[in-house]
Amino acid sequence: MASHHFDHVDRSGSVSGPPSAGDYAFDRGFRGIAWLSAAFILALVVYIVIEIGGKALPAFSEYGFGFLTSTTWNVQTGQFGILPEIWGTLYSSLLALIIGGVFGVAIAIFLTQDFLHGHLAAVFRTIIELLAAIPSVVYGLWGIYVLIPLLRPLANWLHGEFGFIPFFGTSLSGPGLGPAALVLAIMILPTVASISVDALHQVPYKVKEAAYGMGTTRWEAILKVMLPTAGSGILAALVLGFGRALGETMALAMLIGNSNQISLSLFSPANTLAALLASSFPEAGPVEVRALMYAALVLLAITLIVNAIGLAVMKFATRKFEAER
Amino acid sequence: MATRFLLAAIATLGFVGLIPAVQAQTAAPAAPVASGPVALRGAGATFPAPLYQKWIDIYTKANPSLAIEYQAVGSGEGVKRFLENSVDFGGSDAALSDEQIAKAPGGATLVPATAGAIVLAYNLPDVKGALKLSREVYADIFLGRIRNWNDPKIQTLNPDLKLPNQTITLVARQDSSGTTYAMTNHLSAISATWRNQGPGVGKVIDWPGISMVAPGNEGVAGRIKRSWGSIGYVEYGFAKRLGLPMVHLENKAGRYIEPGLNSGQAALAANISQIPGNLRVFLPDPEGDDSYPIVTFTWLLLHDRYPNPQKSTALKGFVNWALIEGQSYSSDMGYIPLPADVVALARVAVDRVQ
């Protein structure tokens, strides 16, 4: 046993000592608990996938891959397809990622690159992180009662003047893709901003000093040195933000308009997978539940694929950066 | 402290006492409780739900030993639960088909409970004055062929109104709905395109055109209220309560009729001769100069035989009351009181229930 290695140590008159039997037990116990917790999480994920997959299996064998390309959702005739929902999920999340990503990274730069005094930056960061504490339902209500009335005149003017552009092809009636994407952008903002801030903080100060020493301007240093150095962290922030946007449910169910159609227009009502699940589950019969389980599986797959792509891109970006170093 | 303990004990006892009662209701109804409260459960159409709720409130206040619950889950779900025998009575705006009646455990009796007009409510905040739509035009709107409010076809019907350049957004029902059934039944009657190439008649429709869906009559009315440029179909009372403007529709006689109790009543009165003995009647396109074109009866679905005699007595009492005294509450809530002939036929049907 390991304990006899310390048997010859003289313990008298010293504060330090070899680990006691209790320490060993504690160590072993802690390791066991850590293993157990990690295994439990893995098992839980596997269980969820199996459970949803199992319930979706009948629908999968019945509708096959046509489920992904059909646009009909009719309980009465038993026709189910989720192409409009897949489209709406990706379209709204992508829009949110573009808006939220630009603002999130800009905020991160603003907070880390000595634009603000340290204390003030900390206060700002806390305020932005507080955005994550607002419940989804409150975002939904805010969208309905504040954002949509604000957005409507602008949207309808754009439709009137530039209606020939497909993005402005319809007027904004109320709920629609535009307001939903904007609210989503605000919801992913704290994720993107705070992880980007951490990434930028991790770049050693010396790197920036070196850049200044080589005669760069402040913006050259930020755009050409700091951002690429923190690139993998910022990418991780964007991937996480996109993942959050894909799965967001409540605010979207309230704002997107539950419309089973595919439209390029930013102001047209649409639907997302998560919103479809939320709005159809409560009153779904057994046939529809199977179809919904299939839709849930598709949502899970999309999220997994996005995260896998994100990880791959991150790995690639890091390696490239390391090679240059 | 002691009283609180006592209260908790009583509550627990009451709860424990309830469990066998519930089991008896669902599993072994053969042994009726000798005395005590009777509980009736119903579910179905959202269309008459406000009126049913009012009836239940008034009737149970007068009969405290009776508890009635009505869940507004939509006609489709209501029929389903009725056929599964998980409720004591159902509510539906679409009467049961012959196959459904044959399948119903304990048989099925259809009792018309009230009638109502289905209105096209819209939201165009800048348009003042009544919007008129011809049969061809509103069929085309629901077919997705007319997609903008300033379409010349709409404008020529409404020369006095300044219609905006705004997309028409349909608001339709998400759940399986008798209101949808009555609406599409009407559209099929007036438009050959809807009947033959369009979606046809059904409780759930894959709407062409830009459409949002919302659950229940209430959900549709609320969505219209919040969405500019939207138009959707709801029962008259729901639109009235939210103050939504309603389209004046062209009827079979070619006149534009304002939705309301009088025009709805006129539609029923002018077509009363068509009511068959089994009370299953749809008026997809009523005759008459003053008739509002989209009206529907809504039915209570009762079993022919109830294993528990107390239940059937209580239910018959309630339905009979609703058919006689209950009708006086209809018009205040935006429903059309049943014509006397229909009430007489309905009471005969109720009397047959055992």
Image (cartoon, rainbow, N blue to C red):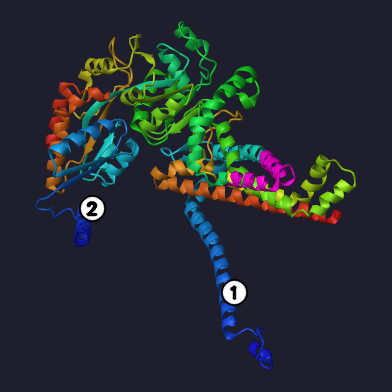
Label 2 and label 1 in one chain: no
Dividing the picture into quadrants, the one containing residue B139 is: top left
Q: Which mark is residue B26?
A: 2
Dividing the picture into quadrants, the one containing residue A167 is: top right
Judged by depth in the image, the label closer to the viewer, 2 or 1, is 1
Q: Residues within 10 Å of mark 2 (few under 14, many from 20)?
A: few
| Outermost residue to the bottom | A8
Residue B209: percent from left, percent from top: 51, 25
**Looking at the picture, which amino acid does disc 1 mark?**
Arg
| Outermost residue to the left | B34
Residue A303: percent from left, percent from top: 60, 49
Residue B284 seen in this snapshot = yes
Any magenta on residue A102?
yes
Chain under numbered label 1: A
Depth order, front residue of B65/B212: B65
Q: Which mark is residue A31?
A: 1
**Looking at the picture, which amino acid does disc 2 mark?**
Thr
Please, is residue B73 above or below residue A155 in the view? below
| Quadrant of the drawing holding the C terminus of chain A | bottom right
| Outermost residue to the front | A13
What's the distance in space between the residues labelled 2 and 1, CA to CA? 52 Å
Main SS of residues in magenta? helix
Residue A94: percent from left, percent from top: 64, 39
Does residue B148 appear left or right of residue B104 in this picture? right
The region drawn magenta spans: A101-129
Tell me the SS state at disc 1.
helix
Does residue A199 appear left or right of residue B282 in this picture? right
